[in-house]
Amino acid sequence: MMVMLKSYVGEFNGTGNIAEDVPRFLASFGHQKTAEHCAAVAAKAKELAAKFDASLSKAEQAGYLHDISVVIPNQKRIDFARSQRVEILAEEIQYPMIIHQKLSVILAREIFDITDIEVLNAIRCHTTLKAKATRMDKVVFLADKIAWDQDGKPPYLSKIIAALAESLNAAILEYLNYLWKRRSQLRVIHPWFIEAREDLL
């Protein structure tokens, strides 16, 4: 196992049951709230996968794993990304929190032995989405926005739920447009987000 990764594993040993292993892994680092969020996203991703004819098991896996890089402190994420030769964008250097989607892929692969490219790709873009996103990418992205990690209900939730009656793309575009109207308030505007929105439009 890579040297820098060892400090983010601790004494953890997986059993192969993602639904049990991920919450236990996150809780062992004091991230109980993130563990609860990941479980909620996994449940919502599975629900959306059933509705939009995607793999339930893959959606659930990606949901559980999407935020596991929370164990890497924000100030160390860029260094960790560089050590793993992850492509780093200027916006991610400016706002390192946003690179966690890419780092979660590494932890999913190295700690939880995930090799399914569909699962890994969905984790990789769960925060920003990307152009030419797959159905699985979209399911996990939207599940993360519906089962968000803040208190209360998301301010955009009712419009997303209404748009889901039309299509998965319509619901996603509802969220992307919500952010776009508030882009002046965002710390950074990630290029993947821009490309995803333009692709859907």
Image (spheres, rainbow, N blue to C red):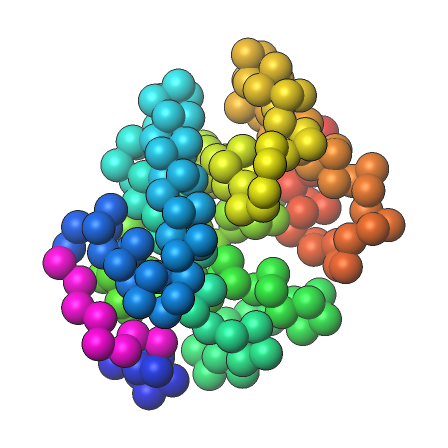
Q: Would you say residue 9 sits in the magenta stretch?
A: yes
Q: Residue at x 33, y 87 (%)?
A: 3
Q: Can you tell which quarter of the image residue 152 is in?
A: top right
Q: Main secondary structure of the magenta part?
A: loop
Viewer-proximal residue among 135 and 43: 43
Q: Residue at x 22, y 71 (%)?
A: 12
Q: Can you tell which quarter of the image residue 159 is in?
A: top right
Residue 144 appears at what percent x and percent y?
A: 50, 41
Q: Quadrant of the N terminus?
A: bottom left
Residue 110 seen in the current view: yes
Residue 121 seen in the current view: no
Residue 59 appears at what percent x and percent y?
A: 35, 38
Q: Would you say residue 105 sits in the magenta stretch?
A: no
Going by the picture, which residue comes out furthest to the top? 165
Q: Quadrant of the C terminus?
A: top right
Going by the picture, which residue comes out furthest to the right? 184
10 horizontally vs 30: left or right: left
Viewer-proximal residue among 170 and 32: 32
Image label count = 0
Residue 125 appears at what percent x and percent y?
A: 52, 50
Q: Residue at x 58, y 45 (%)?
A: 150
Above or below, comparing residue 161 to residue 19 in the picture: above
Q: Residue at x 78, y 53 (%)?
A: 186
Magenta segment:
8-15
24 horizontally vs 124: left or right: left
Residue 102 appears at what percent x and percent y?
A: 49, 62
Going by the picture, which residue comes out furthest to the left? 15
Above or below, comparing residue 138 to residue 127 in the picture: above
